[in-house]
Image (cartoon, rainbow, N blue to C red):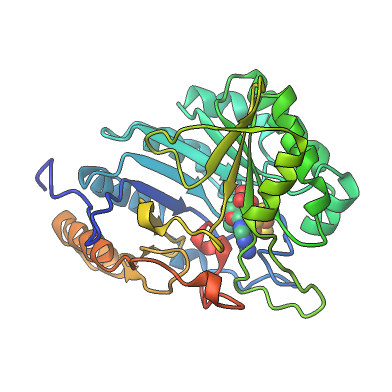
Amino acid sequence: MEKTQIPLIDQYNRHLNYLRISITDRCNLQCIYCMPQGGLPKLRHEDILTYEEILRLARIATRLGVRKIRLTGGDPFLRKGVFDFIPRLTALSGLEDVSITTNGIYLKGNLERLKSYGIKRLNVSLDTLQREKYQRITGYDGFAAVWEGIELATKLGFDPVKINVVVIKGLNEDEILDFARLSLRYPFHVRFIEYMAIGVTDPDVPLCHIPSSVIKDQLEDHGELVPIPKSAYGGPAERFKFDGAPGEIGIISPVTNHFCHRCNRLRLTASGYLRPCLLSDREEDLRGPLRNGASDSDLAAIFLAAASKKPHEHHAASEQSIAFSGQMSSIGG
Ligand code: SAM
Ligand code: SF4
């Protein structure tokens, strides 16, 4: 294949330079907003892309202009062999940034090697600062492990360490300020994310998002929010800082103020489908062609086809529950 091809630019002139790869649907937690009670059916081992297959697709994607890859899951650290795979991924030419999103349970003991493999940026999901509530949300008594991982990552110089907080009515809205105040003591980037009502149907756990405007009002009651300009690959968050704080605060509003017009993402699911929009079930099969002898050019054409089908925007704000037949853990959030 030619080294340089047509970059992934969609019909709305968005440059799709960011690929999120879910390397496994397996997870050691069962967050109430992500997994239904009793868990989800697991993908069969043979239906999950091998590391070789992921590397081949990542190489093709970088030739098409992808510059940033995020590994996600499930939890990426649950997949066997991940620490052999990561340095092979970070070594791909053309990639400027490889980052990881994790629940943080297995972070602490692996930070040194992640650093040596060239990982600089980490997103850790943490929805409460209270040990018991953590167990209620995730089904596991893991708050201390996650917190220790976050602190050590900061000490070791990972920058930024982002803390992803999904804000849910009646569950953790009372902790918005506690999380925001962390940015006064630590260089964390605290990211408040609107809960998306996708796929979790347990009637005993009715969940509801808090609109980002309400989150922002609460933060402004604490002090003036100084806006931070967007950076290249800066992501969808509206970013702020409290005056003099070493850390920052971001608000991500996929529901009430979607960022579709500047969305630069494609998602590769654990089972090898390319998904141009998280909230649309439109997907392109890469695994089938990959295993049936497709050339790099054939696979590149599938990337371009997926880009051409990226919807202009989703309509999550106008829907009670978002139409979504995939699984967050297989798609990677
Ligand atoms: N297991 C890893 C973790 O939790 O960070 C990575 C996968 S997880 C699916 C990726 C992100 O999706 C997490 O930050 C999680 O909080 C977010 N997420 C999952 N379900 C969500 C929902 N219903 N609404 C908003 N965010 C959600
Ligand atoms: Fe929680 Fe992430 Fe696991 Fe979903 S994939 S249950 S958000 S830890």
Residue under the image location 44 percent in, 55 percent down: 259
Which of the 4 image quarters holds residue 195? bottom right
**Residue 231 higher or lower than 112, as above or below:** below
Residue under the image location 39 percent in, 66 percent down? 313
- Residue furthest to the bottom: 203
Q: Position of residue 20 (x, y in %)?
A: 43, 51
- Residue at x-position 77% and y-position 36%: 222
Residue 245's place in the image compared with 47, above or below, is above
Q: Is residue 3 left or right of residue 217?
A: left
Which residue occupies the foreground of this view, 3 or 41? Answer: 3
Question: In the picture provided, is 199 more to the left or to the right than 81?
Answer: right
Q: Is residue 75 visible in the rendered structure shown here? A: no
Furthest residue to the right? 132
Count of marks, rendered view:
0
Observer-nearest of 13 and 129: 13
Residue 267: percent from left, percent from top: 41, 57
Q: Is residue 307 left or right of residue 301?
A: right
Q: Quadrant of ligand 1?
A: bottom right
Q: Quadrant of the C terminus?
A: bottom right
Where does residue 12 sit, x and y in percent of width and height?
25, 60
Q: Position of residue 118 (x, y in %)?
A: 45, 26
- Residue 233 visible in the current orientation: yes
Q: Of 320 and 84, which appears nearest the observer?
A: 320
Q: Is residue 257 left or right of residue 310?
A: right
